[in-house]
Image (tube, rainbow, N blue to C red):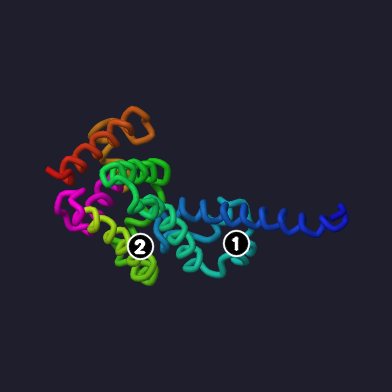
Amino acid sequence: MNSTDKQPVKAPTRRSRAVAAKRSAILAAALEYFSQFGIHGTSLDKVAERADVSKTNLLYYFPSKEELYIAVLKDLLDVWLAPLRALRADQHPLEAIRHYIRLKLEVSRDYPQASRLFCMEMLQGAPLLKAELAGDLRHLVEDKAAIIEQWVREGKLAEVQPHHLIFMLWATTQHYADFATQVEAVTGRTLSDEAFFNQTVENVQKMVIEGIRVR
């Protein structure tokens, strides 16, 4: 293929990258405002200003504030669920749970705004995310609960109910993002402190593993 043939391939790639970058900037700005002020307290003008785009340009990508909010929630749901998706039946159960705890705490450290926004949405009854929760989230949890149940049947884990184990892991790891202000007020430290992060991972892992280890 000569150079002339290759030219048409490059232009769409550059454009798609520019589109992705602009969309990402809008979502990041929206997350910042939504996580602080919620959907009703957030202005699209402020989001557009923060993302360095015109409001008209923002509305080209996201036709309404509700659609922008749902897009932000779906993006953060992907980030939040990535550690659970990584759980596999062929892993050693205790090592898999240890790794899951580390990944979830990394999410709490690296995406605290996303975690807090998700928490706010849940507290409000998830009016704009119910379909996602009842669909993809439920199916994913059922798949991973089946793996945990299999480990229990095989005598590799103590007899725990999988859903309650998953709920407890969510609550424990997300506490460090959703209640970061409380954690810092009590300890004077946050997960951005590497030593405190490692201490948190080690202690949460130890307490959970000791509870689900086969005696």
Query: In which quadrant of the rendered view does residue 194 lie?
Result: top left
Instruction: Measuring from the top left, give residue 63's x and y in whole percent.
Output: 56, 69
Q: CA distance from mark 1 to mark 2?
A: 32 Å
Which secondary structure, mark 2? helix
Tell me if residue 36 can be seen: no
Query: In which quadrant of the rendered view does residue 152 lie?
Result: bottom left
Q: Residue furthest top?
A: 195
Question: Overall secondary structure of the magenta stretch?
Answer: helix
Does 215 sit above or below residue 154? above
Of tags 1 and 2, the one toward the viewer is 2
Q: Amino acid at mark 2?
A: Leu
- Residue at 46%, 63% (x, y): give it: 69
Residue 196 forms part of the magenta stretch? no
Pointer 1: residues within 10 angstroms few (<14), some, or many (20+)?
A: many
Q: Residue furthest front?
A: 154
- Residue at 56%, 55% (x, y): give it: 26
Image quadrant in which the N terminus is located: bottom right
Instruction: Give, as a single range, the part of the protein colored magenta.
Output: 152-175
Residue topped by disc 1: 58
Residue topped by disc 2: 140
- Residue placed most toward the observer, 29 or 3: 3
Does 214 sit above or below residue 65? above
- Residue placed most toward the observer, 175 or 44: 175
Q: Is residue 21 left or right of residue 31?
A: right
- Residue at 17%, 40% (x, y): give it: 210
Instruction: Measuring from the top left, give residue 58's x and y in whole percent.
Output: 60, 62
Instruction: Measuring from the top left, give residue 10's x and y in whole percent.
Output: 77, 54
